[in-house]
Image (cartoon, helix red, strand yellow):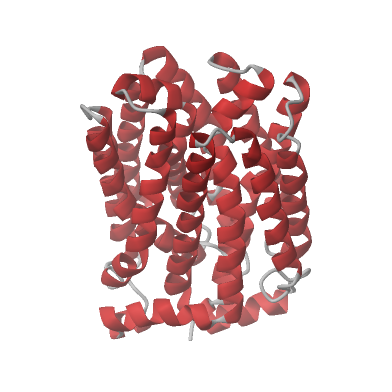
Amino acid sequence: MKFNRPAMLVLSASTFCYVTAETLPVGLLPEISADLDVTEAQVGFLLTSYAVVAALSTIPLTALTMRVPRHILIAVTVAVFAVSQGAAAIAPNFPVLTLSRLVCALAHGVFWSVIGPIIVRLASPGQAGRATAQVFIGNSLAIVLGVPLGTALGQALGWRAAVAVFAVGGAICVALLLAVLPELQPLPRDLEAGTGAQLRDAVRILRNGPVARLCVITTVLVVGHFAAYTYIAPLVRRDAGLDGAGLSALLLGYGAVGLLANFLVGRFVDRRPGTLVIGLMVTVTVSVALLAPVLGLVPTVVAALLWGGAFTAIPVFLAAAVLRVAPRARDAASAVYVVAFQIGIGGGAFVGEQFVSAGHLGVLPLLAAGMALLATIVVVLSPAVFPARISKEDHDRVEAAALH
């Protein structure tokens, strides 16, 4: 199949909506807290509960939907997103807001499980990693534009207006997905296997050493990141006095550097993943550690921008790796990878909440740095997951295995 640029663009827009909506409470902690009369730590729980539900539901729902045509399934997951965001925008209280996000979380895991294999089927041969990087620009734009602009809109018109905008955006993406995606039927081996077999495959895939190591790397890194990132608003308020428009500007810069990093490294995802991912993780380790002491405005901004640039590019390498190390079971491997990522988000937000509630906000950057360092060590010890170099012959072998 030839490279399908319109489909890639709409998939990228869909990831933009999903990532922005999931992390938008980070920028609107004070507004949601004040409007619904709950603490900022409780608002942080929105990320934890979302991630827990997504982690628990991803594998069984992915198995249940294995026989659904892929182009229909991903459109349905985005439709659920749009409806849940609309419900969140009119939620009268915190429990209803939480419930609406949990409905979205049910679709979230399936969305991220199927998008990787869909990208591979739409990409040109040997370009799966580069195509993944192009689609994942939507993730970076979510941080560059979605969260800061959503934060600014929420501060100007109320957080409900910001959420409603993404409900509309999700609805537009549904219509475009149905219009531009080609028919993508399940692969023959997926049609032959029942739901029980798919569930067993998803559990069995963890016995694959490279997949298990990738999940460990993902969980460790993401736990540390979200422990600190969930509370970036109070962190930079403490360190640099940034709030309101200043916070929005910093989040904009955080994502802009991430977008630039994504663009620069995207062309090398299929060729030199090991060297680059190690460099990015080391940058995360150093930059987030610099946020532990109160350094003032300029050092805080520089450290935050480096953190954003390095971390935002890493998921491209993780997503490409899971498709590369399990070519014969990409849906199952993607499902367990999504679970690992959601455990990281939920675990990180929960750990961050515990530290913040105990009055230890300043410990979070050190925790994130330590976890990033640990993940880097595992990457160095896992050349089968992140090889220093990948040849064209290696790509051909992977694609041949995926087709048989």
Residue at figure coordinates x 39%, y 41% from the top left: 45
Q: Position of residue 59 (x, y in %)?
A: 36, 68
In the rendered view, tell whether residue 198 sits above or below residue 105: below
Q: Position of residue 95 (x, y in %)?
A: 24, 37
Residue sitting at the far front: 358
Q: Position of residue 329 (x, y in %)?
A: 46, 78
Q: Quadrant of residue 174?
A: top left
Residue at figure coordinates x 37%, y 24% from the top left: 33
Residue at figure coordinates x 61%, y 29% from the top left: 235
Q: Is residue 211 toward the left or the right of residue 380 in the image?
A: left
Q: Quadrant of residue 241?
A: top right
Q: Is residue 147 toward the left or the right of residue 247 in the image?
A: left
In the rendered view, tell whether residue 118 sits above or below residue 313: below
Q: Is residue 189 toward the left or the right of residue 374 in the image?
A: left
**Front residue of 171 and 197:** 197
**Front residue of 247 and 334:** 247
Q: Quadrant of residue 219?
A: bottom right
Report if residue 141 is visible in the image. no
Q: Position of residue 87 (x, y in %)?
A: 22, 35
Count of numbered circles on the image = 0
Residue at figure coordinates x 62%, y 18% from the top left: 242
In the rendered view, tell whether residue 289 sits above or below residue 53: above
Report if residue 324 is visible in the image. yes
